[in-house]
Image (cartoon, rainbow, N blue to C red):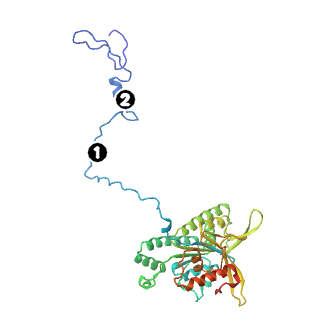
Amino acid sequence: MDGSPTGAGVPASAPASPGGAANPAKPVTPGTGPAAQATAKPSPVGPVGPVATKPVAIKPNMAPRPPVQEAAPQFLIQEFDSRQQYIKALVYAEHGVGKTFLVGTAADVAQMRDVIMINAESGETTLEDPTHKFNLIDLVRVHNFKQVARVYEFLKLYCEIRDRGDMEALLKLEARFKRVPEESLKGRQKIYRTVIIDSVAEVEAYCIGQLLGITEKVAFDQEPDSAEWAQYKQALTMMLRLVRGFRDLPMHVLMTAGRKYIQDEQKRFNYTPALTGQSATKIQGFLDMVGHLVLSSVGEDGTIHRRLWVQPAGRFSAKCRFSRYKKAFFDDPSMESILKAVGLLEAPTSPKQPQKAASQQSAAGDNPGQSANVKT
């Protein structure tokens, strides 16, 4: 030993050459010696250059992976003229004017049958009229918001089965919820194409009641909590989701509501559906038609005439997305006359009926006092 310092892993002298002379020591880069290579950690980014990979052997008890399948599209492209059109409408009016009667006339239209009504207001008495086909309407009496949600789920499933043409499954579904044997429905099975919500204002009241914990078990003399800002915000979200869900069903959707008046920025009073807060305006945005129904006149024989405003031509809310209909109102409306006017119902094939219907429509639009009589 000559006492010269040596680095870790660096020999003190180089081995002799075959000729006997000692070879000069080669410089060694720190960290590359044998000891350093033995303790070096693998690089986090992996080795540089191509690396040979070993084939993974499949064990006898290991099933091979299935082939990767292409995911289903997340949306559907539909041609404009190929879509199925339904009317989504809200009719609001003062109590007793005839909004339930009007939406009930959907039962008179073959293309709208069959009709199912969510009866939240117990107003079906107005449909006891033998001159109409109101007896073909099926009723669902609801007492709380949860029941309304279950009806929506039923209709969503019903439409899926209906649209794939599984009549046997439809029969079983109808028999289950009517609680009757399937055999009793053969020959009179229903195909629902229209749902009526009478009324959406009462459904909202059920929604707020649920948020406050008010159920059928709460005694009438028990003082409930008052709804606060948080409950109204929750009710708004729940109602918008519910109305949006019903609107998206592949069927005609008709809603009713009472009316109330509100003040605008200029302190003027305007009529609007009797819904709470922002629900009164936001729900209207989901629908194709919002009609304000009023009594227009009374004939000499005592016949009451009604007018359905579908354009905001006064101090009231109204709308109509159907550009085919140019007028601001319908006189003595029915669902048949409305669907014909907006182009959702084919005109009669008889050559005399279209002329008669056109003349009645002209008279109704120009002179409400000469409208055809409607039994109320």
The residue that label 1 is drawn on is 56
Q: What residue is drawn where x is 45% and y is 74%?
A: 162
Residue 268: quadrant of the picture: bottom right
Q: Which mark is residue 40?
A: 2
Q: Specify the amino acid type for callout 1.
A: Val
Extreme-left residue of the structure? 18
Which quadrant would the N terminus be assigned to in this image? top left
Q: Secondary structure at mark 1?
A: loop
Which class describes the residues within 10 Å of circle 1: few (<14), some (14-19), or many (20+)?
Answer: few
Q: Position of residue 292 (x, y in %)?
A: 67, 74
Query: Going from the N terminus, do you reach mark 2 or mark 1 first?
Result: 2
Relative depth, front residue between 39 and 106: 106
Q: Nearer the viewer, residue 317 or 24?
A: 317
Which residue appears at 45% of the width and 78% of the height?
176
Label tally: 2
Q: Position of residue 108 (x, y in %)?
A: 55, 83
**Relative to 15, does residue 193 appear above or below in the rendering?**
below
In the rendered image, the quadrant that contains the C terminus is bottom right
The residue shown at (30%, 40%) is 53
Q: CA distance from mark 2 to mark 1?
A: 27 Å
Residue 70 in sight in this render: yes
Residue 324 appears at what percent x and percent y? 59, 71
